[in-house]
Image (cartoon, rainbow, N blue to C red):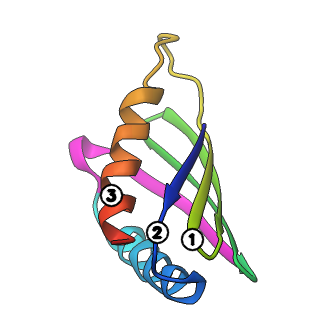
Amino acid sequence: MHLEIPHTLGKEEAIRRIDQTIAEVEKQSLPAGVVMKNFTKAWTDNVLKISFWAGKSVFGGTISSIITVQDAMVLIDLELPLDPEGLSVESQIEEGVRGKVTPLLN
């Protein structure tokens, strides 16, 4: 999944806000008994790579993301595990990501 979210903060402020928010998310509990394990994050200049396993009991998968912060745009590339029932939840995830990131960058 690829998302492009515009902003007017400048690259450095957008990076600061994203980094702060990721640090907070890393500490939060997830709803409905979902757990997050093996969280990794690494910045290389303006590119953030994140990976973690999320799931419940033995069901779950690894979610990976590359976030590229540009002067006026944040590019988010998400790699999601397949849903066990083969259902696409991509639109729900896109809506959730946009709902969190857009206010963060305003």
Query: What is the three-letter code of the residue carrying label 3?
Result: Lys
**Residue at 39%, 61% in the rendered image:** 101
Which residue has dot 3 on it? 100
Q: Quadrant of residue 26?
A: bottom left
- Between the C-alphas of marks 3 and 1, the distance is 17 Å
- Neighbourhood count class around disc 2 (C-alpha, 10 Å): few under 14, some 14–19, many 20 upward: some
In terms of secondary structure, where does tag 3 sit? Answer: helix
Q: Quadrant of residue 67?
A: bottom right
The answer to which of 47 and 60 lies nearer the viewer is 47
Q: Position of residue 43 (x, y in %)?
A: 69, 79
Q: Quadrant of residue 76?
A: bottom right
The verdict on residue 36 being magenta is: yes
**Residue at 50%, 79% in the rendered image:** 14
Q: Is residue 2 left or right of residue 93?
A: right
The answer to which of 21 and 59 lies nearer the viewer is 21
Asked whether residue 15 appears in the rendered view, the answer is yes
Q: Position of residue 10 (x, y in %)?
A: 54, 83
- Between the C-alphas of marks 2 and 3, the distance is 13 Å
Which residue has dot 1 on it? 72
**Residue at 36%, 60% in the rendered image:** 102
Query: What is the three-letter code of the residue carrying label 1?
Result: Ala
Q: Position of residue 50 (x, y in %)?
A: 62, 62
Segment tinted magenta in the rendering: 30-42
The dominant secondary structure in magenta is strand
Quadrant containing the C terminus is bottom left
Which numbered dot is residue 7? 2
Q: Are marks 1 and 2 in contact (CB under 8 Å)?
A: yes
Name which of mark 2 and mark 3 comes first in the sequence: 2
Asked whether residue 56 appears in the rendered view, the answer is no
In terms of secondary structure, where does tag 2 sit? Answer: loop
- Between the C-alphas of marks 1 and 2, the distance is 5 Å
